[in-house]
Image (cartoon, rainbow, N blue to C red):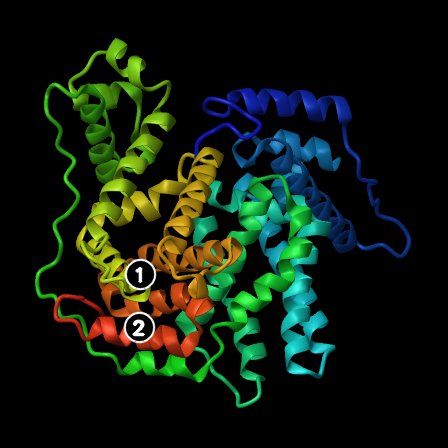
Amino acid sequence: MGATRRRAGNGSNGRASQERSWRSRGSRYPKLKPGPGRSAEDVAAHQRGRLQAAMVELVAEDGYDAVTVAGLSHRAGVSKRDFYRHFRGKEECFLATYETIVRNSVRSILHASSAEEDWPERVRTGFQAFAEQIVRSPDAARLALVEVFAAGPEAIARMLRTHGLFEALVAKNFALAEGGTHLPPLVVKGIVAGGARTARARLLAGDAARLSLDGEELMEWALSFCDDAVMRLRTLPPPRRSLPPPAVEWEASLGDERALILAATARLAIRDGYGALTVPAIRAAAGVSRRTFDAHFSSVVEAFLATLDQLGTRTLTAALPPDANGDWGWSVHVTIASLCEQIAADAGLAKLGFLEVFSPGPEAMHWRASLIGRLARLLRRNAAPAQQMTEFAAEASIGAIWGVIHHYAATDRTAHLPRVAPTLSYLALAPAMGAPAAVDAIAAATAEPDAGLADATPPA
């Protein structure tokens, strides 16, 4: 998302604002000078800690894009020369700060949950510890959960790897349940992604304190997947569809100027990435004047987000079944299976919707949060009263599904998505129907000749 949270345009206004801020406020961290009993290593470690604390503060004030080495050095009370002794640049400083936040978070959750002997209390305490960390340190949480997407591909890759630490914690705690339920790794990945999504939504809304109330509901949502019925997903047959669905078309008639601009934006972003988008490039590809572009969009960011809106509408329309037969579970599963097939068949859809979507910055994060909210409302629509899950659970489930698909897109494995569609449907249906009924609904839909569903065993 592009550029607005507390900054505008391409980030230059934010950098100017931040520069005024750190010049007026100066360093707020006492220096640790060498002396008797203090080694050079102690001083260096103290400087690194101050620089990481400064990174958290400056990112919270104006976002990652606006952070500069000069601003970090000034806020931390460290010379630029010493900064470069510790880090090669602001990205390396950001990644080190991110790693510190994640390690501290995992350590805190592990300490809180391991203090409990009773299995339900271990699970409850773990989720509550996660929520309380965000409430206590919202700036650090924002860096790790929101701004990480603005820090570039390496930061996102680091995030995907560190999610494994939280997944190991969840898997370990759930395995301690009576009977020892061992959840499939993909379900665990979805639980972690759904929890991160709910926290991210609260941070974006400026309502981190609400997570204290969400902790219990987050735990209940996660526990809905803890059932041996999930293992039946592995027995479902492979996809039945032999022909992939058509890719989303980006052509537009000459008379529709807005559609021409959107089509050009999509083609350029798919070919060269969001970073290559400029107004002149879009205009040239669309064959429109600057006046025409300005009549429809105020910036590249706005044009790109409008492109994503159109992409989402077209994709979802193509995925919705023509007749749900009054069966909500069937409809949800067929929709998810169709979405998986579309993403697997269309590299452009996967790139725009799950990779380039993060490139513009905070505006795109808000767009993504809004989209997940809309999809959550769609998930709840048409459900029978007995199957009506809460708004919180619906958003957590959609966040879980989105997180798993993003993982497959980021690891270049979207071709395998149809095989995991039943697991994604389980993440959507189990909180509403209960695990056994959810698996029954998925199995019934999989048996349909045209359902196009897959087994849940993820590729190695």
Which residue sits furthest bottom? 179
Q: Residue shown at 40%/38% (left/top)?
A: 359
The residue furthest left is 243
Residue highlighted by disc 2 = 441
- Outermost residue to the right: 36
Q: Are marks 1 and 2 in contact (CB under 8 Å)?
A: yes
Relative horizontal placement of residue 246, taking residue 225 as reference (left or right): left
Residue drawn at 70 percent across, 57 percent down: 132
Work out whether mark 1 precedes mark 2 in sequence or the reverse, and give the earlier one: 1
Q: x%, y% of residue 257?
A: 19, 19
Mark 1: secondary structure: helix
* Residue 41 appears in the figure: yes
- Front residue of 459 and 195: 195
Q: Residue 282, how many percent across, how many down?
A: 24, 23
Instruction: Please tell me which residue is depicted at 44% across the width and 61% down the height of the picture.
Output: 385
Left or right relative to 225: residue 355: left
Q: To which residue does mark 1 refer?
A: 332
Q: From the viewer's perspective, is residue 133 above or below residue 312?
A: below
Query: Would you say 184 lies left or right of 125 here?
Result: left
